[in-house]
Image (cartoon, rainbow, N blue to C red):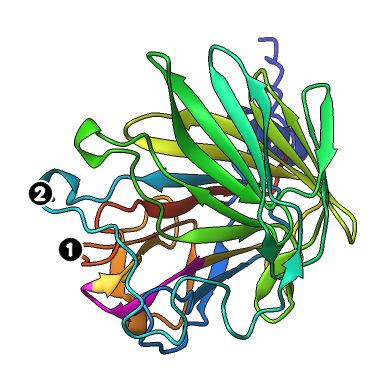
Amino acid sequence: MPLHPAPRTASLPTLFIAALLSAGPALAAPVAATIENGTTPTACAEEDNVSMVLRGEGIRHMRIEALQPDYLQKIGNDVTAPDFSGCNFDGGAHPTDPAHRFRKRTVVLLDNAEWRIVGMTLPTFWRPQRVPVQVGARSDRGFHLLQVFKKENGKALEAIVLYPSDGYWRLKPLPEARFGDGVYGSSFLLGPVEQAGRPVVNIASIRVVPKPLAIHLRFTNGGSAVARVDEISRKRTALDVTLSRPTAGAQPFAVLRSMYVAPDNADMSEVRWQESPNAASQASTLPEVKTINATQVRFGRSLFSRHNTSAPDIEFSGFDDEAR
């Protein structure tokens, strides 16, 4: 009786390779940012005493959104007037700020069916920088505000403000009709954050590409960022941000700036976050937060505020170690 040959068995290395191939591509672990609370006490509702400092290792991409507060539909009286009752200034320049003088002007840099972009130079500003700005083919410099308006039924509604001289941003969703032009609350810095009496980002130049709308920043100490305007709607204004260089752990890549006097007198009074995409959401009042790690973090309010009641929450999410 002939002997049947023994069946061939795959070698261990072959089986190992096959197992890897059948498992599909490996999924990268989500990237988390470290957020540190640098808030200081104040009695002044017009002073940015809140600093939520974001650091991380190797981050190249993120999403930044201004979102309507959860209690928006319950607002009866939207309080938007400034409140200087606890301040040592009355709406003019801050008493401790330098006052560099400029020629006041307002320039329409772009006006088409979808967007209106305006550059504004104030008569005085606390920093002397005159940052070059290019919008489409038009170049200028020395603006203290760049305002981005979205056209809706022929009306221009402001949704984004960037301050070229110190690197601050403000975002807001398009307001419901009963809230008029809407109101800003918290601001943020994006890029390599430095200290210059207060946190700043030093911008060397700004280039705005109108279609699709994207804001390109070049930083004075090297590196750049692109903030693509992903959405401006009644629900949110969202930026999709790509950094040219991965972040390094020691230097902040963003800072959320806001105001907190008391839980009912604040532009942000609560932090909500997830430590990983599948983790349960956590929430703490601002004074309780020290340092957290998060793949998504939202700075906002659950309690009605008597200051800028309808101002949006600001959320950072989508931290990634790959550019997009």
- Tell me the SS state at disc 2: helix
Residue at the (43%, 77%) spot, across then down: 90
Q: Residues within 10 Å of mark 2 (few under 14, many from 20)?
A: few
| Residue 2, x across and y down, in percent | 70, 10
Residue 72 in view (yes/no): yes
Q: Which amino acid type is shown beneath numbered disc 1?
A: Phe
Q: Which residue is mark 1?
A: 304
Task: Report if the CB atoms under discs 2 and 1 are less than 8 Å apart.
Answer: yes
Above or below, comparing residue 103 to residue 57 in the picture? above
Q: Quadrant of residue 282?
A: bottom left
Residue at the (76%, 65%) spot, across then down: 101
**Residue 263 magenta-drawn?**
yes
| Residue 254, x across and y down, in percent | 62, 62
Q: Specify the principal SS of the magenta part.
A: strand
Above or below, comparing residue 92 to residue 238 in the picture? below
In depth, the one of 280 and 239 nearer the eye is 239
In depth, the one of 235 and 290 nearer the eye is 235
Q: Which residue is mark 2?
A: 74
- Tell me the SS state at disc 1: loop
Residue at the (83%, 54%) spot, across then down: 130
Residue at the (68%, 59%) spot, across then down: 123
Q: Residues within 10 Å of mark 1 (few under 14, many from 20)?
A: many
Q: Which amino acid type is shown beneath numbered disc 2?
A: Lys
Above or below, comparing residue 244 to residue 152 in the picture? below
Q: Which residues are magenta?
A: 257-264
In depth, the one of 158 and 87 nearer the eye is 87
- The N terminus - image quarter: top right
Is residue 203 found left or right of 105 in the rendered image?
Answer: right
The dot on residue 2 is none
| Residue 145, x across and y down, in percent | 64, 48
Is residue 269 found left or right of 49 in the rendered image?
Answer: left
